[in-house]
Image (cartoon, grey):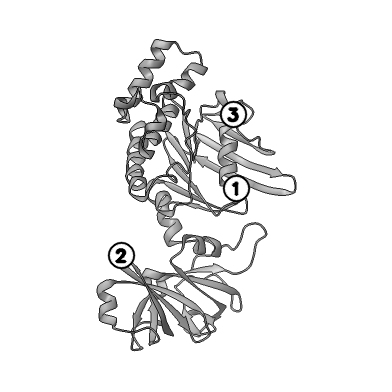
Amino acid sequence: MTNPHLKLDGLAKSYGSFTAVEGFSLDISEGEFIAIMGPSGCGKTTTLRMLAGLETADRGQITLAGKRIDQLPVWERETPLVWQNLALFPFMTVRENVEFGLQMRGVSRPERRRRADDWLEKLGISAYAERNVARLSGGQRQRVALARSLVLEPKVLLLDEPLSALDAHMAIKMQGELKKLQRELGITFVYVTHSHSEAFSLADRVVIMNAGRVEQIGSPQDIFLRPRSKFVAQFVGGISLLDGRITGADDGKRFLETRDGKVRLDHGCSLADGDTADLAVRADRISVTVDPGWGENEIACTLVSEEFAGAVVNLHLETASGHSLVAQLQQRDLEQLNAACGTRVFASWHPGDGVLLESAQHPGHGTRARAP
């Protein structure tokens, strides 16, 4: 990426002996929507706070529009943060909350009101301008928090799990409104979330963090379909993992020798015979039959349980060695399968549907994948 709008270069932050973030680097284009994900304690919020200026990085630099900002105070960075709890002033009206940042910057009262009313109108909450924020619904308060940040006309908007306090229906509605707003404004969004659905539906690129480090950066499709490490595959979910050793054959085909037999790998495996590896297969790519012989890669299993998930059903399977697999079937396919729990079934998939992950550990980075 040439001339990134926002550049994070080697950021690191420790608290005593605990390393919260180590070597975080990311180039972000102007108008890009970036989502940062990972388990609790992985360093995603600390990274956001360093961007906002609420934490000082031990090492590394932050550059915005070609200007280094990591040494600037919060109010000079043009990177306001929308908090998880929104942090609105309960003793102020909606308009006063939106005007507050402008007031701190010395903007005249008429100009403050004009700009605040403009954003209240854009976000559909102008009717509540004189209402105390404590009397608003969760969705309305969310809009006030956005208006308070956007009225400052920032170059980058930071959001720390802004939808986590909303109910499921309102959160989905706000997802759509957030994405529409971001596209219309062309503002760079950096968004921290625990929600897979939020990250994958909103972001142009997703950053997966683990133990303070970046595990993978890519489009939602890349992260979902082509995880580059065992950690990412398990974090994204809906993936079955098989471990074993690489073996070859005289005809050039490559296999993974597992505890439940050989499974063929896709063309282009670069690992050597004898190397250990994990194979990731998405649940929706696994077929389940009561008779063998329906797939090139096939493992005999016992159907342990069914998990109803709306339009689809997750089948939990167990191999002879005790290994767990998950297959995702449409409801009509489950009806055609007609297999009760405890039944012997066969799980199969095409070699091209497996993603090969190296099992060798790299300190602080988890496993890394080579293209199968």
Query: What residue did someone put label 1 on?
Result: 43
- Where disc 2 sits, the SS reads loop
Q: Residue drawn 52% across and 35% down?
A: 6
Residue for badge 3 = 69
Number of numbered discs present?
A: 3
Q: Secondary structure at mark 3?
A: loop
Q: Nearer the viewer, residue 360 or 255?
A: 360
| Lower sequence index among marks 3 and 2 | 3
Q: Which residue is label 2 attached to?
A: 310
Percent x, y for residue 58?
70, 38
Q: Compared to 129, does 212 lie above or below?
A: below
Q: Where does the image place residue 14, in percent across and percent down from the top left?
A: 70, 44
**Which secondary structure, mark 1?**
loop
- Whether the residues at callouts 3 and 1 have beta carbons within 8 Å, the answer is no
Q: Earlier in the sequence, mark 3 or mark 1?
A: 1
Q: Tell us which disc is closer to us: 1 or 2.
A: 2
Which quadrant holds residue 306? bottom left
Circles 3, 2 touching at the beta carbon (< 8 Å):
no
**Disc 2 residue type?**
Gly
Task: Give the residue displayed 33% in from the left and 87% down from the top.
Answer: 290
Real-space Cα separation, disc 3 to disc 2, in angstroms: 47 Å
Is 152 on the left-hand or right-hand side of 210?
left
